[in-house]
Amino acid sequence: MPSFKVSLLDYGAGNVRSVRNAIAANGYEIEDITTPEQIDEAKVIVFPGVGSFGSAMRVLKEKGFDGPLRKYLSDHKRPFLGICLGMQTLFESSDEHEEGQDAIPGLGVIPGKVVRFDSTKMTVPHIGWNGRILHKESPVLKHVSPLEEAYYVHSYYAPITEENKEWILSSTTYSGEHFISAVQRGAVVATQFHPEKSGSTGLRVLKGFLEAIENGTLEQTENLAVDPQAKTELVKRIVVALDVRSNDHGDLVVTKGDQYDVRENHKEGVESGRGGVRNLGKPVALARRYYEEGTDEIAFLNITSFRQGVIEDMPMLQVLEEASKNIFVPLTVGGGIRSYSDPATGQTWSALEVASRYFRAGADKVSLGSDAVQASEEFIASGGKKSGGTSIEMISNVYGVQAVVVSIDPKRVYVNSREDAAAEHVVVELENGQEGPNGEKLCWFQCTVKGGREARNICAVTVAKTTEKLGAGEIMLNCIDMDGQGNGYDIALMRAVSDAVTIPVIASSGAGTPEHFTDVFSKTNVKAALAAGMFHRKEVEIEAVKAHIRDHGMPARSSY
């Protein structure tokens, strides 16, 4: 029986439900800090920072938490765990602010300033599973192998300096940049990675922290010799998508059609074969299966949400709430994340408010589709001026760019020559073996909206570039022509978009074999690859895909 409760400093931004569930999974009760006085009374504080540095510090000040928190941390004797932004706020300041503004002051517990990764040298944000170089032995990491990767998602990092070296518990490298990935001094611990999103590895990090408080060993660390040439590597992510809709009985089911053909008048319960819509199980149970089989992320895509009000879409909120209870990898939700007015009452909710509901229910990222295409069109029409009112801008300004995924659904428009397409469209040459039905070699990729039902006069490369400027942190890149065919990802499309942006791209549509994953990773700059049907039908196991990737000299996360 635990001897203490965990005090959670939830300042109201992002998904902290998973942190709650991860602590509960280790057998501890949680009490929320709602007043400054509770900080001084706490036995142990967990601070799961999600969002932007400026908004976090502003809320801490508004609630009167900043002063008591500095006092709590001052002698390094009281147990504290900061997560991601919760670690960054411990530093003196951060460059995460609007252009032209001064650096934002932090809590000032650790010397140094948090700075941004250089997007001219690497893909930003740093999203995915990466390793750790140990600088200290600590009871916090007692149950974790040094070889186990953890999940990171951040655009800003804390550089290693002479002044903060004594704090470093572990460091990590990303595209040549060496940064602090965990700190500990006395009883004050913090991680740049997300334990609550790092699978069983992360649960064991939390176990080590809480267990060390129980037995009084938390402060017993020992410095290690560090190889200055040591490096870690960001792995290739495997993402499983679950297309969710309501069946004839009103239940949410996972379904899979081909080339976006997901009609609701198909017979319910068909579970095998290509060519029709197939219902493949209940979403929470299926997601749990994929978590246990080693998926790196899960995406719930609500393919019928455009037909009903998002705020009233309680079943999908319940899916997230239930999934996050025992699935500790990142969860993305998409479908209908937009501003919404209730025709019955006239009440209006902004896209930010809608997204907030999903974050609080357990989502780590929201995926925007049709809204993102419209935002791109408006951005171009304005001459490249941000309005501040698009869904992308509103959500990323509060929760950070890493919380916003733009899902692009393009289809091929074949042309005989590059001159046949309008000048604003990017024409690409198709990969050998992926030509059009009549042997076409050239095409541009026309974006669609409303689940592929309406084409717009804008190309996928343009939408990717404009949404990056508006504040998207990741692109989920689909291809209607390849969807459900099992013939591989559209290499030309993936290459064109991943080469045009500096944010991570997730390849989607077309995977049918492990070779298709290795192919897209080796031929393009995508950082992750998504599949649905091949996993749902158990044609290929997730571990078989990862083994194939490793066999071809690329890193993939192992399940521990």
Image: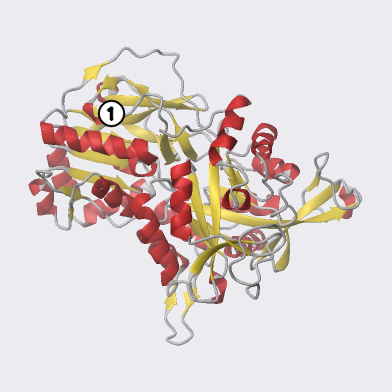
| Residue type (three-letter) at the residue carrying disc 1 | Leu
Nearest the camera: 305 or 499?
305
Seen in the image, is 20 located left or right of residue 219?
A: right
* Residue 381 found in image quarter: bottom right
Residue at position x 59%, y 37% in the image = 545
**Spot occupied by residue 537 in the image (x, y as percentages of width and height):** 60, 52
Helix, strand or loop for disc 1: helix
* Residue 199 found in image quarter: top left
**Spot occupied by residue 250 in the image (x, y as percentages of width and height):** 49, 75
* Residue 369 found in image quarter: bottom right
**Spot occupied by residue 135 in the image (x, y as percentages of width and height):** 31, 20
Compared to residue 374, the image places residue 33 above or below, namely above
Compared to residue 252, the image places residue 46 above or below, namely above
Seen in the image, is 246 located left or right of residue 353?
A: right
Seen in the image, is 97 located left or right of residue 137?
A: right
Residue highlighted by disc 1: 141
Quarter of the image with the N terminus is: top left
